[in-house]
Image: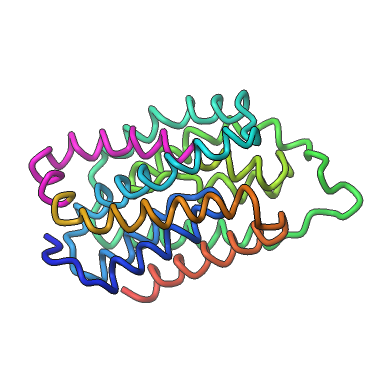
Amino acid sequence: MIGAVPILLALAFLVTALLYASVGFGGGSTYAALLAISGLDYRLLPMVALACNIVVVAGGTIRFARAKVTPWRGALLMTALAAPAAFLGGLTPIDQSSFMLLLGASLILTALTMLIPASAEREGEASASARFMPIIAAPMGYLAGLVGIGGGIFLAPLLHLTRWKDARAIAATASLFILINSAFGLAGQLLKAGTSAFGGAIGAALPLLIAVAIGGQIGSLMAVRLLPKRWIRWLTAALVFVVGVRLLFGN
């Protein structure tokens, strides 16, 4: 188990939650990396990371909804298609090397898509491929459940690339997507690992849950009121790329 949680680890979780919540994410991928460094059994990483995700994006989802930036029809459609697949992904066994390789490679690829500029003359106009985004929701949900994250980090770059909605609407959609997928993925992980393992991991990680709750509230407030759209896009790419490289080459 985690044992006594170091202050630096809790602080790292708080900062991670703040930064990720500011772009509509939960931070599950970085929590997993931090927990791997701390020595937690990789089979328990998804459960702790998903629980932290839920704590972070629950507040963010409410803030986005109150700010009336959530495109409910499209967001709920993609989430409804992804959630059952996330549950199945959570049930699927995976070894440690495949876990780290799959997660790291996926994050680097999604970060690179964020660096492709939208044509200036058509900025704000959805591309023809935007209508097909719901089709890829299910495979993204399965991948998210398999590696124990919410999946918004896979979804958001594609939504930006196709100019599906504006940056804040995409952040709101990713937040809702992560919240529901994390709940379904966690249910699958619980059935796979057992409730006793989950209880022990979460009990030891309680200070981390408190840290991400604080950081997530600050970050979601920044996303709704402070950050310019271009910053949201660039910050998303930077976060995703750094974590992907860390998982591929730092373990």
Residue 39 image offset from top left, x and y in percent: 18, 68
Tell me what residue is drawn at x 46 percent, y 32 percent: 82
Does the magenta-highlighted stretch encompass residue 120?
Answer: no
| Residue nearest the observer in this picture, 98 or 59 | 59
Question: Based on the displayed image, in which of its 4 quarters is residue 59 positioned?
Answer: top left
Q: Position of residue 99 (x, y in %)?
A: 31, 56
Relative horizontal placement of residue 179, taking residue 222 as reference (left or right): left
Is residue 225 depicted above or below 59 in this figure? below
Q: Which residue appears at 78% of the width and 36% of the height?
A: 128
Q: Residue at x 49, y 55 (%)?
A: 218
- Residue 37 sits in quarter: bottom left
If the image is split into quadrants, where does the N terminus sit? bottom left
Q: Is residue 164 left or right of residue 29?
A: right
Residue 159 location, x and y as percent? 65, 44
Residue 177 drawn in magenta = yes
**Residue 83, relative to residue 120: is it above or below?**
above
Horizontal side, residue 46 vs residue 237: left or right:
left
In the image, the segment drawn in magenta is 176-201
Along the viewing direction, whichever of 74 and 129 lies nearer the viewer: 74
